[in-house]
Image: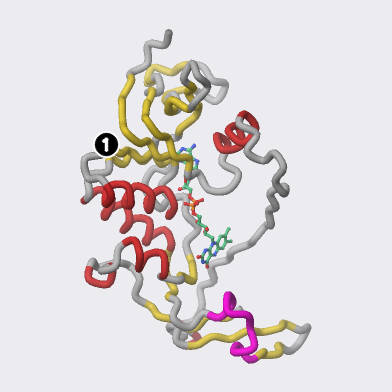
């Protein structure tokens, strides 16, 4: 029997990225009296989100149809796009109308995904979602029948060897009827769930690619608002 503090919710969501926040908003839109809480391991929503992003608004149009009236951080529409093959000394431009639809960006927006998450968090809080930034979910709890009971948040105040410091605070147990894991790809709790419930049985193995993002500071005269270059 643990002596951790226990909090009960209808739904606990692990992860404050676009998927966790959208889930929280949708649940409250469907049933406003649900008790929904969302945990984010970063110190604030958006702090662990890759920033620069070309954004297709279809999902947001469905979730929050009046997003344009709600001071969202989605402002810069793609006005020009280029697709370039880079050679050693020259680049070759390819007509974008010849690209497959998924690579065409007109009608999309250039945004900061971190800012979008911050704004989604405001929308979620306005609907009554309790958001706890700075609280990583570190362990999954199970009911006697094997179903997921909730999670435990990480103990705070341990030194690098795992010894308790004066500031030690034991993690909390959050119990829920439904726990949603929205940790992003390769979340450590997600990996445990995939193994325990054999969610990958008979499925194609997951594939990962490594992507690099660089933020370049460029001279203002080279900046062209609305330009996407691939
Ligand atoms: C290099 C790169 C470029 C991309 N560019 C684009 C683009 O231009 N346009 C586009 O639409 N998409 C783009 N994407 C994809 C997009 O970033 C993802 O699809 C999206 O972020 C997935 O959202 P998510 O909420 O599932 O996960 P994530 O965005 O990964 O969010 C997960 C959140 O959960 C938190 N978390 C994780 N584990 C825990 C835990 N145990 N406890 C508490 N919190 C936890 C994390 O801190 C994070 O905030 C790009 C991705 C990459 C890697």
Dominant SS in magenta: helix
Residue bearing mark 1: 35
* Camera-nearest residue between 166 and 132: 132
* Camera-nearest residue between 181 and 172: 181
- Residue at 37% in and 65% down: 60
Does residue 161 lie above or below 89 as drawn?
above
* Camera-nearest residue between 100 and 174: 100
Image spot of residue 106 (x, y percent): 48, 83
- Residue at 55% in and 34% down: 189
Q: Residues within 10 Å of mark 1 (few under 14, many from 20)?
A: some
The verdict on residue 201 being magenta is no
Magenta residues, start to end: 95-104
Q: Quadrant of the N terminus?
A: top left
- Residue at 35% in and 71% down: 74
Residue 152 appears in view: no
Residue 137 horizontal side relative to residue 206, left or right: left
Q: Quadrant of the C terminus?
A: bottom right
């Amino acid at each position: 029997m643990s002596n951790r503090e226990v909090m009960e919710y209808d739904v606990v969501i692990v992860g404050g990225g676009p998927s966790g926040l959208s889930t929280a908003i949708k649940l409250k839109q469907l049933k406003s009296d649900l008790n929904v809480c969302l945990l984010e391991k970063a110190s604030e929503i958006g702090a662990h989100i890759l920033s620069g992003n070309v954004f297709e608004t279809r999902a947001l149009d469905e979730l929050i149809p009046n997003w344009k009236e709600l001071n969202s951080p989605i402002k810069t529409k793609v006005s020009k796009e280029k697709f370039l093959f880079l050679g050693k000394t020259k680049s070759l431009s390819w007509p974008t109308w010849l690209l497959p639809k998924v690579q065409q960006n007109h009608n999309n927006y250039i945004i900061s995904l971190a800012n979008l998450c911050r704004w989604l968090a405001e929308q979620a809080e306005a609907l009554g979602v309790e958001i706890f930034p700075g609280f990583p979910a570190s362990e999954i709890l199970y009911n006697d029948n094997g179903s997921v009971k909730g999670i435990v948040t990480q103990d705070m105040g341990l030194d690098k060897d795992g010894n308790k410091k004066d500031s030690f605070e034991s993690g909390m147990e959050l119990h829920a009827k439904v726990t949603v894991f929205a940790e992003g790809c390769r979340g450590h709790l997600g990996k445990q769930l995939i193994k325990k419930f054999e969610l990958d049985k008979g499925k194609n193995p997951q594939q990962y690619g490594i992507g690099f993002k660089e933020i370049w500071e460029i001279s203002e005269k080279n900046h062209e608002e609305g330009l996407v270059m691939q």
